[in-house]
Image (cartoon, coloured by chain):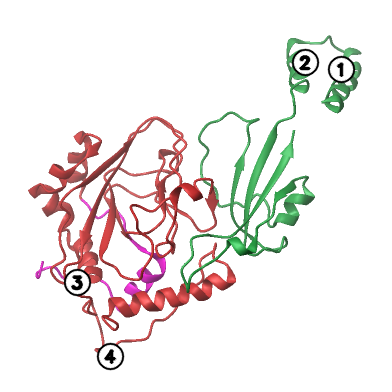
Chain colours: A green, B red
Amino acid sequence: MKDAVERWIDTQKKKLQKAPVTSEDLDALRDCLQEPRQQVLYLYSKSTNMRSPIASWSLCDPTKPQEPTLPSQERPYASVLEAMADGWRVVQFPISKLYRYEEVDNDYLGYEFVLEKWI
Amino acid sequence: MTDVKPTMTDSDVMDFVAQGYVLLEGIIGEDFNRQCDTLPPGNANAFITSDAFIEEVLLHSELAGVARSLLGENFRLPNGGHHHFYEAPHFGQTWHSDGLSGSGYDVTNLQCYYFPHAVEIEDGPTMILPGSHCRAVDREAIAHYGDVLGQVSLTVPAGSVALTRYGIWHKAGPKTNNKKRSMIKFSYYRTSPPVRDWKIDATEMPAYQNRARLPYVTEVESYRDRVRRERTWDWLCGANT
């Protein structure tokens, strides 16, 4: 939060040389003062290796309006590692022993990594 | 149903075994599609068992031909069904299979989705996951699954019907507009033991020719898929009954 407010101040200082602070600028300041909120990203990797390709994904983002969004076939990241490079932190690794199957029957798609960002 | 002719070849049946569904696009006539406009949401037993529905939909040569191919002689017509109707925007359903379905290698019924209107992506089309029909699933435990590589949104012209193995994972997709979207769901049932009596060129039963790995499938799962497909193929041919 502190970093965001400092950035806002720096921006406004520069802007004030040409134009006054507006209502929209103050709304942006209010946004900066919000407590950080957690984004959660589920990535289903094709193995427990973080370099494996992604088979399925789901993003839970409380910072955006909660409204229907169209399905997509565009993976947000090619791998868990790529997501980490973009600032996502892994909060749950797949536990191999949970991915059990009996003979050839199973009930899962991929290996579930749970990642988070605080924004 | 002895007068219904099978329409699928060995290769078509092998495709179904791998994918878990057959899609027939735009087969039902527009006159009958429009008769569905006044159907209320919910239970549609009376409509589905009406003479008009039986003649125009259930016994349509292409649709019944698939049912005949996969369910054998004397397959049973649906005795009811459901009208899934959406109008307002919504988030869509979560992935699920119906009932206690999903495991096993038999094909004892075909669950069908009939779309009397054209369906666009914004209309919240039914979505299916090809190849998921042999995976038993706890629907509450996968409610957080989102997009899956290889998922199919059934964006189809009016009068289309998808026939699925009962256990296939499916859901109503997210809907972002206020357009009416109808899907009439019903099932055909097998009444006789499986026999390879669809359209065949040679009497000798061919071995299953494996199909491509589906996009979401892991390495080891592709081996399991092959075994599952071979078992389903053998079962349908009556080789292990």
Which residue is denoted by mark 4 in the rendering? B204
Name the residue rendered at 50%, 49% in the picture.
Answer: B141
Which residue is denoted by mark 3 in the rendering? B72
Labels 1 and 2: the sequence-earlier one: 1
Q: Which label number is shown at residue B190?
A: none
Q: Check residue B8 for magenta coloring.
A: yes
Q: Residues within 10 Å of mark 1 (few under 14, many from 20)?
A: some
Which residue is denoted by mark 2 in the rendering? A25
**Is label 4 or label 2 in front?**
4
- Range shown magenta: B1-28
Of residue A94 and residue B68, the one placed in the foreground of this image is A94
Q: Is residue B205 above or below residue A48?
A: below
Report helix, strand or loop for mark 2.
Answer: helix
Q: Are marks 4 and 1 on the same chain?
A: no
Name the residue rendered at 44%, 43% in the picture.
Answer: B173
Contact (Cβ within 8 Å) of mark 1 with mark 2: yes
**Which chain is home to disc 4?**
B
